[in-house]
Image (cartoon, helix red, strand yellow):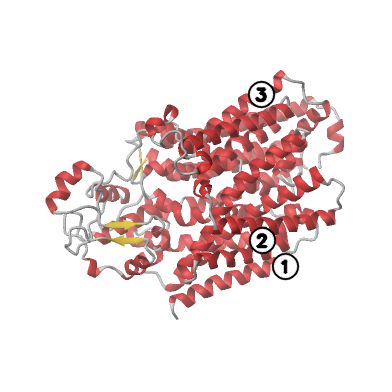
Amino acid sequence: MVDEKKTKGEISERDHQYWAANLRLIIGVLITWATVSYGFGILLRPYLMNVMIGGADMGFWFAQQGAILTFLGLIFFYAIRMNKLDKEFGLED
Amino acid sequence: MSQFTINMLFVGGSFALYTWIAIWARAKSTKEFYIAGGEVPPVMNGMATAADWLSAASFISVTGLISQGYFNSSFIMGWTGGYVLLAVLLAPYLRRFAKYTVPDFVGSRFDSKAARLVAVVALLVVSLTYVIGQMTGAGVAFARFLEVSSTTGLIISSIVVFFYAVLGGMKGVTYTQVAQYVVLILAFTIPTVFISLQLTGHILPQLGFIGTHTESGIPLLEKLNQVVRELGFQDYTADVSNKWNMFLFTLTLMVGTAGLPHVIIRFFTVPKVADARWSAGWALVFIALFYTTAPPLAAMTRLTLVTNIFPQGADQPALEYENRAEWFKKWEETGLIKFEDKNNDGLIQLYNDKNPAFVENVANEKGWAGNELYVNNDILVLAAPEIANLPGWVIGLIAAGGIAAALSTASGLLLAISSAVSHDLIKNTLYPEISDKTEMLAARLSMVGAILIATWLGLNPPGFAAQTVALAFGMAASSIFPVLMMGIFFKRINAKGAVSGMLAGSFFTVGYIFTYLGWFFIPGTNTYPNLPEFWVMGISPLSVGCIGALINFIVAIGVSYATEEPSEEIQKMVESVRYP
């Protein structure tokens, strides 16, 4: 359940800083997320035809392998950074 | 031991395991029934989420879809990328809200019964569409491996699901899903590893995929391009012309994934907010294991199939029908492979007879009278062990894996359906005064009802059963995802905005789908033919969900700002969800 004290208590400046830092992280993650899939994997593929990853052109590789691996990296990156942020702000639950 | 006996042993053994888990993990309270007591460790939850996610369709059909070429890459990115959205936009906050169901969150956040009910309806449309495919999928998997009719298979599956879902609720479902994941991932990866070793010498199919084809000494993908090109097909890696639609389709699949209730409720089961973030990562680890293996399997089995038919290359005569392999004969009996000797030369000509230039320049000259081989896409997975000459137990494993994939997804969906009925409709709307014990009984009875309805729908599939991708993903993307995201990130959204947004998004999406696929999917009632030249701005009905989501956002924000602010209490609640 939602913490009683928090619901009633005022939102402090620190809380706002925490949220702003989180939003910045989210935006960074989503930009990378879109770049590897919609960018490399779909829209930019024609311009990347000469870059080869093994036997595949870069766009094809990202569409079928690279995007997934990047997604994985992104989620763990976000989890690690948020845990650090929680500690910094003393907001662990 | 006959193949049938081996298959029986594998399927029977896995069923015994699921039943044992069901008895071990009986639910004792509504908290255990709805969210497994909120104490599932993140790695376990990740595995259960992966089993929830990898359906019969993914297990059996997705490899075949991918094997048609690059243009179907949308499925690969779409069905994995949604987890990034879940991890950063929804899962941690929904976990912090500590609710039992998706409509429960919507109802509490907007303090509105109307919003809760619209969310329940959206959830039911999405989950029912989805579950029919799983029930029929389980029936088909049974029929293929255990020589029973698909009706019998479906009924056996229902009984097994009944046992562990009614007894154990989310707790039983979670721990059986963990076991089901192990079965299905072994079944999928073992044959792929062997095929990769045979073709490229790489143990990891992901490396073999971009490695060198041992026999010809050129990259595997280049070899595949060459082979299919010689038969008049488009290059395997050929780019697509309608990038716009591919972009929208991928986006719809991603946003839809993040809006599927049976996936979202999995994040309610972990102990802490941080665990919800880890859990999304682990879920994608286990899903990635599947989705990075599928493209290599697709490319390698397609190459193997073609080189089987043209052993000396496409410019030499094709295989004689009399000399076809054993697995070929076996799968012919199921009708998944069909041969028709159109030019009566006893050879199997496989080529693209819809390519006019190729027909005129090559096929006619050789006296070919049309493509003679029909191969169902599902063959690439179902027959993979036989194509790779693997022993009988691997085939048994594939049988158990296919059934596990169907059952795990079906049980997750049934749980989402029954908890929405018992918790949101019965407890929170109709009879708020009932005790925990009575609600638990209601939850079990709802589960029984959901299983009966799903079984009945599986036996008599309605028109919308085949439109899972269009309807379920379209609805999830256009109604559920936006309302959850706005509920967390935009304090200003009120109940009126949320309700009108959900209605506008889903009516637009469903209307667009019906326009091209038939009103209520009744054949012949479509307003326009489902062809690219009739689509508005080149958007296919399968890709429209993300446009619906955009409409949902715009309408919800517009209506909210035109009406009163949400109460102070609600605004404080939203703020409190942001900080642990």
Residue B169 visible in the picture: yes
**Residue shown at the point (14%, 54%) measured from the top left:** B367
| Amino acid at pointer 2 | Tyr
For disc 3, the marked residue is: B557
State which chain disc 3 sits on. B
**Residue shown at the point (71%, 18%) measured from the top left:** B562
Mark 2 or 3, which is nearer the eye?
A: 3
Expressed as whole percent of the image width and height from the top left, the position of residue B192 reads: 42, 60
In the rendered image, the quadrant that contains the C terminus of chain B is top right
The kind of secondary structure element at disc 3 is helix
Mark 2–mark 1 Cα distance, whole angstroms, equals 10 Å
Mark 1–mark 3 Cα distance, whole angstroms, equals 48 Å
Point out the tag, 1 or 3, that comes first from the N-terminus. Answer: 1
All told, the count of numbered labels is 3
In the rendered image, residues at marks 2 and 3 fall on the same chain: yes
Expressed as whole percent of the image width and height from the top left, the position of residue B174 reads: 67, 58
Q: Is residue A60 left or right of residue B125?
A: left
The kind of secondary structure element at disc 1 is helix
Expressed as whole percent of the image width and height from the top left, the position of residue B211 reads: 35, 51
For disc 1, the marked residue is: B24
> Looking at the image, do the residues carrying marks 2 and 1 touch, with CB atoms under 8 Å apart?
yes
